Image (cartoon, rainbow, N blue to C red):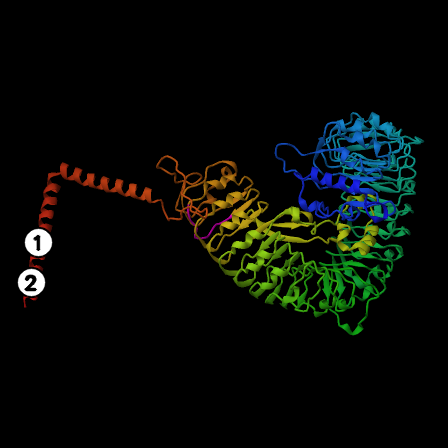
């Protein structure tokens, strides 16, 4: 194949050779579309591959995150550069986060010197050290090089002066100090330099950047820099437009030094201790600054009164800065070009100043998590007709239920306003909105008219009554959160949106059965109905939810047996059926659930992209992207992350966003389940983190197969009727943090005090009177040779109530002791000896008379 007929055969073969070289270090699903058997398969159509539409040559390979290493001996993957030499027109290669430890001898990156068109190379997140630098210096065509998150230090960069075309260099998350600036001084062409997350500390002088005359973007975040010293008329970094100094130790005086950068447009000083006040003179000199970010910094509250002199400012972010009092009506309201303002997480109070109506260019406004009050319909918000994103959640605003104050906001796409005071109004002034929202967090009666609405966030909004039937009109709905309200009645059966991904109605007073509205929904990721009053059983159609990752039904009145259809949910992360009335056995087929992060596709987080965010402090640009690509692709400020609570390690934790990809657990506690614990539960994928079967009526023994659960952190089997011994093999569960078998009928010795089991106290074993050994107070007194516990064909230990060998020996010892005691007493005391023999004689006479008399009566009866 070649040209317009598909990819070139030599490049197709090279890709398959690359796949073969990683076979021991990767998951097969990474390269599923790369078909070796189908010789007609066009590699230009394969995932991770992009070809030139004219020549058919491969120009981009995105092979990041394809290598897996479990940390075992033998090290990670070793790179072979010759595999990439057939790609003569390759321009972009991404090998980041692949656990690359090095390269095959004589097959390092020096071989890439023949790839004359290679411009972009990503090697972040590997295990390279400085030995890689000399080989990289031979790739003369490079314009962009990413070496972040490796094991590099400041030596060996001298030869990078040969990279005369290099414009972008990322060295973040390494071990550099100040000396790196001198080492890089030979790269005159640099326009972007990232040294964030390193060991730079103390004072940095502008003279150290003298060689970087073309630098436009500089990232120094997350170091320990205390000051940035500049000199007047230094004529250094005159082209610098973007400077990130966040997560350092700067004070407010740094602003005076930064006035030396005349072209500066974006400045990030967030997460610093900005002690001191900004002067109007300093602020006015930053006359080209467009974006100023000061989040999580202790700034002086007078800043908002002085900031009006920054006439070019378009973005202002002062989130979580400890600002308080009323918003001033001077200064910040004079920012005619301002497009985005972030004031969330402060202690502002009172009403919004009327001068806000002057901010006619404002497109994004975040007032959330403050103490603002007053009737929002009487605020200046209704005049801000350019608004695209508006958030005023978690305040004390009075919000009229008709939402008529939004009438003029024709551009509004995202509205977040939960946790305020909703005031009911009559609908006599009914109106149809002129906007089409994508995200909404408060619920008016006309919500069904917004046909494009995709996301609703209304948690903790004091909503009462049944779920509005108007929601059923939202056919594009993907995220619905009505949790923690006072809703009651049935869940509407008209919910038939096949696009819905996240459905949260937990912590309400909803009743009735689980509706069939979600049947066959292959897009549903999370169904959270916990802490309601639902009745009935889990419907059999639950198995049709092929994409379901989270199923939370805790704290309802659901009953009957747990359906085997749950076993069809092979991609499940979390299953919580606790505090219900389920009965019958635990389904053996639950082991079919994979509980494997490698099969997931990042559905819970993924909202944050460093590449998107670092290019701009602006949320507005990402909102526009989100409206084009979909809501789950953009900035986390919208909080479009799934958040669930799950009990593990004897506590209830909240899991949110990306962490849900790695949290796997089953909670069946506080039900009426009975029968043996299935052996198959011990054969569930070892990635499971929590298993809770406590407070049921389970019997039989603890399966030895539980020792296979190598990553389990919490195992609770307490308050059941389990018997037999605790399998000693459980000590192989080296990740255990919480273990409890309390209040059962277990017997024998506790497991050896080694690995994690040395950390468990007697509370883990209490309520089992026949258990002995540490940490319990009753020791196992009899010492005998160790023996192997008999195991039946199913792998279970014998389940007898007690050790019969111990019983027989104990009985014999007691019997002999009592007999010898009686003989000793009779031997020593003549009086008791005579009394004893007299008693024996009386008993013999009595028995003799009884037998003779009754024998005669019986004989006479038969004779008659």
Mark 2 Cα-neighbour bin, 10 Å: few <14, some 14–19, many ≥20 = few
Q: Position of residue 234 (x, y in %)?
A: 92, 30
Asked if residue 54 lies left or right of residue 570, the reply is right
- Position of residue 133 relative to residue 571, above or below, is above
In which quarter of the view is residue 439 placed?
bottom right
Whether residue 302 is visible, yes or no, is: no
Q: Does the magenta run of residues contain 751?
A: no
Q: Secondary structure at mark 2?
A: helix
595, 450: nearer the viewer = 595
Q: Secondary structure at mark 1?
A: helix
485, 453: nearer the viewer = 453
Looking at the rendered structure, which numbered label has been put on residue 848?
1
- Position of residue 712 relative to residue 853, above or below, is above
**Quadrant of image for the C terminus:** bottom left
Asked if residue 502 lies left or right of residue 429, the reply is left
Nearer the N terminus, badge 1 or badge 2?
Answer: 1
Which residue in the protein does label 2 denote?
859
Residue at (49%, 37%) from the top-left corner?
A: 758
Which mark lies nearer to you, 1 or 2?
A: 2
Q: Position of residue 498 (x, y in %)?
A: 71, 63
Looking at the rendered structure, which numbered label has been put on residue 10?
none
- Find out whether the residues at labels 1 and 2 contact each other: C-beta distance under 8 Å: no
Q: Position of residue 360 (x, y in %)?
A: 89, 56
Count of marks placed on residues: 2
Q: Position of residue 81 (x, y in %)?
A: 76, 33
- Which stretch did the figure color magenta? 716-724
């Amino acid at each position: 194949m070649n040209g317009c007929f598909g990819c070139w055969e030599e490049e197709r073969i090279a890709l398959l050779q690359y796949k073969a070289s990683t076979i021991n270090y990767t998951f097969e699903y990474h390269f599923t579309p790369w078909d070796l058997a189908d010789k007609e398969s066009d590699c230009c159509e394969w995932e991770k591959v992009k070809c030139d539409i004219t020549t058919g040559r491969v120009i981009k390979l995105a092979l990041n995150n394809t290598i897996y290493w479990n940390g075992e001996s033998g090290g990670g993957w070793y790179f072979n550069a010759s595999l990439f030499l057939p790609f003569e027109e390759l321009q972009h290669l991404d090998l980041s986060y692949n656990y690359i430890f090095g390269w095959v001898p004589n097959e390092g990156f020096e071989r890439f010197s023949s790839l004359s068109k290679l411009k972009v190379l990503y090697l972040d997140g590997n295990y390279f050290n400085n030995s890689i630098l000399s080989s990289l210096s031979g790739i003369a065509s490079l314009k962009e090089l990413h070496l972040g998150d490796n094991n590099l230090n400041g030596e060996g960069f001298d030869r990078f002066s040969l990279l005369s075309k290099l414009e972008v260099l990322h060295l973040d998350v390494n071990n550099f100090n100040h000396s790196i600036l001198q080492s890089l001084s030979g790269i005159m062409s640099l326009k972007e330099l990232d040294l964030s997350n390193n060991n730079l500390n103390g004072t940095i002088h502008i003279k150290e950047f003298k060689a970087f005359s073309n630098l436009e973007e500089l990232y120094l975040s997350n170091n320990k820099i205390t000051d940035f010293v500049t000199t007047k008329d230094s004529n250094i970094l005159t082209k610098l437009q973007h400077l990130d100094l966040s997560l350092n130790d700067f004070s407010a005086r740094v602003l005076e030094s930064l006035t030396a950068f005349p072209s500066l447009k974006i400045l990030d000083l967030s997460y610093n201790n900005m002690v001191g006040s900004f002067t109007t003179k300093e602020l006015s000199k930053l006359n080209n600054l467009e974006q100023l970010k000061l989040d999580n910094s202790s700034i002086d509250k007078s800043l908002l009164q002085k900031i009006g002199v920054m006439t070019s400012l378009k973005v202002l972010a002062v989130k979580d800065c400890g600002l308080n009092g009323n918003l001033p009506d001077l200064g910040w309201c004079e920012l005619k070009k301002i497009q985005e303002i972030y004031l969330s997480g402060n202690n502002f109070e009172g009403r919004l100043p009327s001068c806000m109506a002057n901010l006619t260019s404002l497109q994004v406004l975040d007032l959330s998590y403050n103490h603002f009050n007053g009737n929002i319909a009487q605020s200046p918000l209704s005049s801000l007709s350019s608004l695209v994103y508006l958030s005023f959640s978690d305040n004390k605003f009075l919000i009229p239920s008709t939402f008529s104050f939004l009438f003029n906001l024709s551009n509004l796409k995202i509205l977040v306003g939960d946790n305020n005071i909703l005031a009911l109004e009559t609908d006599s002034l009914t109106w149809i909105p002129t906007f089409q929202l994508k995200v909404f967090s408060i619920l008016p009666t006309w919500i069904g008219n917004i046909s494009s609405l995709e996301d609703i966030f209304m948690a903790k909004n004091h909503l009462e009554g049944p779920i509005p039937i108007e929601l059923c009109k939202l056919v594009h709905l993907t995220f619905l959160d009505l949790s923690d309200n006072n809703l009651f009645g049935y869940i509407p059966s008209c919910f038939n949106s096949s696009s819905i991904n996240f459905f949260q109605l937990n912590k309400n007073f909803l009743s009735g059965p689980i509706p069939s509205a979600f049947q066959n929904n292959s897009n549903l990721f999370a169904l959270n109905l916990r802490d309601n009053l639902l009745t009935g059983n889990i419907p059999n159609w639950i198995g049709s939810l092929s994409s379901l990752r989270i199923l939370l039904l805790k704290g309802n009145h659901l009953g009957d047996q747990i359906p085997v259809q749950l076993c069809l949910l092979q991609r499940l992360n979390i299953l919580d059926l606790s505090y219900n009335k389920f009965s019958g056995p635990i389904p053996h087929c639950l082991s079919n659930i994979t509980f494997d992060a490698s099969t997931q596709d990042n559905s819970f987080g993924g909202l944050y992209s460093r590449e998107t965010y670092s290019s701009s402090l602006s949320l507005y640009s990402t909102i526009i992207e989100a409206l084009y690509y979909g809501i789950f692709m953009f900035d986390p400020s919208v909080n479009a992350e799934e958040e669930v609570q799950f009990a593990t390690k004897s506590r209830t934790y909240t899991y949110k966003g990306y962490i849900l990809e790695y949290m796997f657990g089953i909670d069946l506690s506080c039900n009426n389940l009975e029968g043996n614990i299935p052996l198959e539960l011990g054969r569930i994928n070892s990635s499971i983190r929590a298993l809770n079967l406590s407070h049921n009526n389970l019997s039989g023994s603890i399966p030895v197969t539980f020792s296979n659960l190598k990553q389990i952190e919490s195992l609770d089997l307490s308050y059941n009727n389990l018997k037999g011994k605790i399998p000693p093999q459980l000590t192989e569960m080296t990740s255990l943090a919480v273990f409890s078998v309390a209040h059962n009928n277990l017997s024998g010795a506790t497991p050896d005090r080694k690995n994690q089991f040395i950390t468990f106290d007697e509370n883990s074993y209490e309520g089992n009177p026949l258990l002995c050994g540490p940490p319990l107070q009753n020791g196992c007194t009899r010492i005998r040779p160790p023996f192997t516990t008999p195991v039946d064909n199913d792998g279970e230990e014998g389940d007898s109530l007690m050790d019969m060998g111990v019983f027989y020996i104990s009985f014999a010892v007691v019997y002999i002791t009592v007999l010898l005691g009686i003989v000793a007493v009779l031997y020593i005391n003549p009086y008791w000896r005579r009394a004893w023999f007299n008693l024996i004689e009386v008993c013999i006479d009595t028995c003799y008379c009884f037998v003779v008399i009754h024998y005669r009566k019986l004989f006479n009866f038969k004779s008659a």
